[in-house]
Amino acid sequence: MNENGIISSRRNFLKNMAYGSLLMVGGLDIASAKARAKQVVSHKVSHKKVEVAHTLSHQARVHDTLHKHLAASSHKAAIAPVHARAQTSSPKIIHNALFDNSVSHKVLALHNMHTGDQLKLTYFEEGRYIKDALHEINHLFRDYHDGSIHPIDPALLDQLHELKHVLEVRKPFNIVSAYRSPATNADLRKHSDGVAKNSLHMEGRAIDIRIEGVDTRRIRNAALAMQRGGVGYYGRSNFVHLDTGSVRTWGG
């Protein structure tokens, strides 16, 4: 109901009430009672008009304020991603949306055969890679020749995680070679024709592994079935190479 409808309805109600009250009090005829009732109603309706006008004015101010607040909130929401990028929400975890991370958490058991370092840790949880865990893995995957450390591609860790489930094993991955510095890679090339000049080991995107008690041919076949990157088979040296490059294979 609009403002005029509210006032008209209230006028009729008050008029009838006032008219009836004056008749009950007595001392007035019908014509006088009607006249007095009209005066009373006029006064009350005028007062009500002021109240309604005040209410509408207040509502307009509230609407105005709310509109400004929503506009400001929208502006803040628009710039929020920029602030989120500038200020990392937590120093403990980082997010990477490049891979299928439908698994709630991912655990790896690792053993560096050259340094003796061992780890069993959760490196991915609730849609995010855990930054501290990645740092520990980077250290374990370091170049054991000169101690240099390089960030390891999380996709490589995901390959290992998927591989352990395909093989249905719980034993740790024995690491034969992980990160290699350019100097180490160049030196190894002098002694072996099996070392690529632009090896992905130098980018933290490749690893050579074996698993105790598991035939390397079985590891190779499982890795090939995954179709997630390069797979090299080195039967004589007893290890399998995995990397996050294009899907390809080599080795006898």
Image (cartoon, helix red, strand yellow):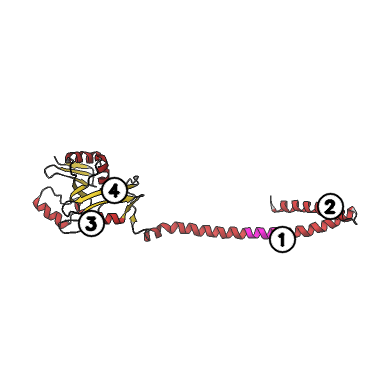
Mark 2 is on which residue type? Gly
Point out the tag, 3 or 4, that comes first from the N-terminus: 4
Q: From the image, state whether disc 3 or disc 4 is nearer to you.
A: 4
Q: Name the residue under label 4.
A: 107
Q: Locate the C terminus by quadrant.
A: top left
Q: Which mark is residue 139?
A: 3
The residue at the point 71 percent across, 60 percent down is 50
For the residues labelled 2 and 3, say whether their Cβ atoms are less than 8 Å apart: no
The residue at the point 20 percent across, 43 percent down is 231
* Magenta-colored stretch includes residue 57: yes
Q: From the image, state whether disc 4 or disc 2 is nearer to you.
A: 4
Q: How far apart are marks 1 and 4 (CA)?
A: 72 Å
The residue at the point 33 percent across, 48 percent down is 105
Q: Name the residue under label 1.
A: 50
Q: Distance between the residues labelled 2 and 3?
A: 95 Å
Q: What element carries label 1?
A: helix
Q: How far apart are marks 1 and 2 (CA)?
A: 26 Å
Q: Which mark is residue 20?
A: 2
* Magenta-colored stretch includes residue 54: yes
Point out the tag, 2 or 3, that comes first from the N-terminus: 2
Mark 1 neighbour density, 10 Å: few (under 14) some (14–19) many (20 or more): few
| Boundaries of the magenta span | 52-59
Point out the tag, 1 or 4, that comes first from the N-terminus: 1
